[in-house]
């Protein structure tokens, strides 16, 4: 597989940063809702909520997804004969090497 040029990643990062900055400026100039509490309190609460959600998702990801991916890898594909792309890559191909090795050992 051919790697995209390095400048493509830089352009992508600049576009994302530019859109974020534009949204921030427009929200400052013309907010979509009234401010009812201090911004710092709201941002802190959002960061704590996001951190808790990240921790829960990280803890539950492997115990839930490993059995599901193992089940999916054991099933045959149900594409009709002659279907283009009849053998799509299984979940095991997409998963990283360490997880696949762990699945093979169990």
Image (cartoon, rainbow, N blue to C red):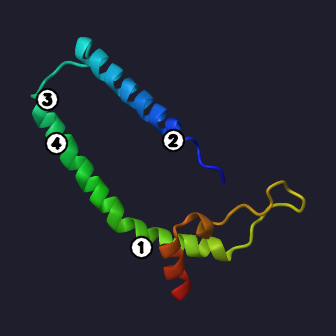
Q: CA distance from mark 1 to mark 3?
A: 37 Å
Q: What residue is disc 4 on? A: 45
Mark 3 and 2 residues: CB-CB less than 8 Å, in contact?
no
Q: Farthest residue in the front direction?
A: 6
Q: Secondary structure at mark 1?
A: helix
Q: CA distance from mark 3 to mark 4?
A: 10 Å
Q: Nearer the viewer, mark 2 or mark 4?
A: 2
Q: Earlier in the sequence, mark 3 or mark 2?
A: 2
Q: CA distance from mark 2 to mark 4?
A: 37 Å
Which quadrant of the rendered structure holds the N terminus?
A: bottom right
Q: What residue is disc 3 on? A: 39
Q: Nearer the viewer, mark 1 or mark 2?
A: 2
Q: Secondary structure at mark 3?
A: helix
Q: What residue is disc 2 on? A: 6
Q: Nearer the viewer, residue 100 or 45?
A: 100
Residue displayed at 33% across by 67% down: 59
Q: Earlier in the sequence, mark 1 or mark 3?
A: 3
Q: Farthest residue in the top direction?
A: 29
Q: Nearer the viewer, mark 3 or mark 2?
A: 2
Q: What residue is disc 1 on? A: 63
């Amino acid at each position: 597989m051919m790697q995209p040029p390095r400048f493509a990643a830089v352009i992508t990062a600049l576009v994302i940063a530019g859109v974020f900055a534009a949204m921030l400026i427009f929200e400052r100039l013309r907010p979509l809702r009234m401010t009812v509490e201090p911004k710092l309190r709201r941002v802190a609460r959002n960061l704590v909520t996001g951190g808790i959600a990240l921790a829960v998702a990280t803890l539950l990801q492997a115990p839930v997804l490993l059995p599901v991916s193992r089940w999916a890898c054991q099933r045959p594909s149900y594409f009709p004969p002659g279907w283009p792309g009849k053998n799509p890559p299984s979940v095991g191909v997409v998963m990283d090497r360490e997880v696949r090795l762990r699945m093979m050992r169990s």
